Image (cartoon, rainbow, N blue to C red):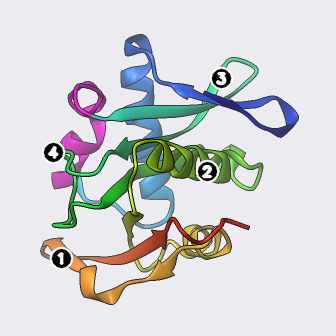
Amino acid sequence: MSDTTAGLRVRPARPDEFALIGDLIVAAYRSVGSDHPEYEPTLRDVAGRAATCDVLVAEVAGDVVGTATFVPPGGEMSEVDDSGAAMIRMLAVDVAMRGHGAGEALVRECLARAVACGAARVRLHTEPQMHAAHRLYERLGFVRDPAFDFTPVPEVNLLAYVHHLGVAAA
């Protein structure tokens, strides 16, 4: 668990928050043009993810304002065949709270967890239109890795990013 500035705190999600977290992810993705009804059940299955991964939340004054799922190397929710890589999945921040550090705090916590579990890299996927997320990832030391781009369902093209943990985050 980590504390950040201005009362923002990152911690593990609680089961009583799972429905809220699912709603937050769906709303955040829709707000940037990522509206894929066939994927919504996966986004809302927070309990399923929490069974094998670390579902994290960013909170301010007791309110959940963001979330991310940390997948350890070799975790069953990994989207890549890379045994040395942890993954960040389903990062989302409440639309009203964007630009206040929740996304950065969640990514930094995932990077810290990756170091703690001995990962060599952290990977993630994002959609092309998620420009603010791309800027955040690049500022924190992630680089594009087109060799790991993929299309999980028709009309959804995911861009891959990787952070080699030997490179310090800014």
In which quadrant is the N terminus drawn?
Answer: top right
Tag 4: amino acid: Glu
Q: In this rendering, would 55 be left or right of 139?
A: left
Report the Cα–Cα distance between label 2 and label 4. Answer: 22 Å
* Main SS, magenta residues: helix
| Residue 11 appears left or right of 104 | left
Labelled disc at residue 71: none
* Amino acid type indicated by mark 2: Arg
Label 4 to label 1: alpha-carbon separation? 19 Å
Q: Are marks 3 and 4 in contact (CB under 8 Å)?
A: no
Secondary structure of the residue carrying tag 1 is: strand
Compare marks 1 and 2 and give the one earlier in the sequence: 2
Q: Which mark is residue 76?
A: 4
Report x, y in % for residue 9.
70, 30
Q: Amino acid at mark 3?
A: Asp
Mark 1 Cα-neighbour bin, 10 Å: few <14, some 14–19, many ≥20: few
Residue 135, position as x, y percentages in the image: 63, 75
Please give the residue where the numbered disc 1 appears in the rendered image. Answer: 151
Q: Earlier in the sequence, mark 3 or mark 4?
A: 3
Whichever of labels 1 and 3 marks the residue nearer the N terminus, that label is 3
* Bounds of the magenta segment: 38-52
Name the residue that disc number 2 marks: 108
Identify the mark at residue 63; answer none if there is no mark. Answer: 3
Q: Pick out the residue farthest to the right.
A: 6
Q: Residue at x 21, y 60 (%)?
A: 83
Q: Earlier in the sequence, mark 2 or mark 4?
A: 4
| Amino acid type at mark 1 | Thr
What residue is drawn where x is 38% and y is 55%?
119
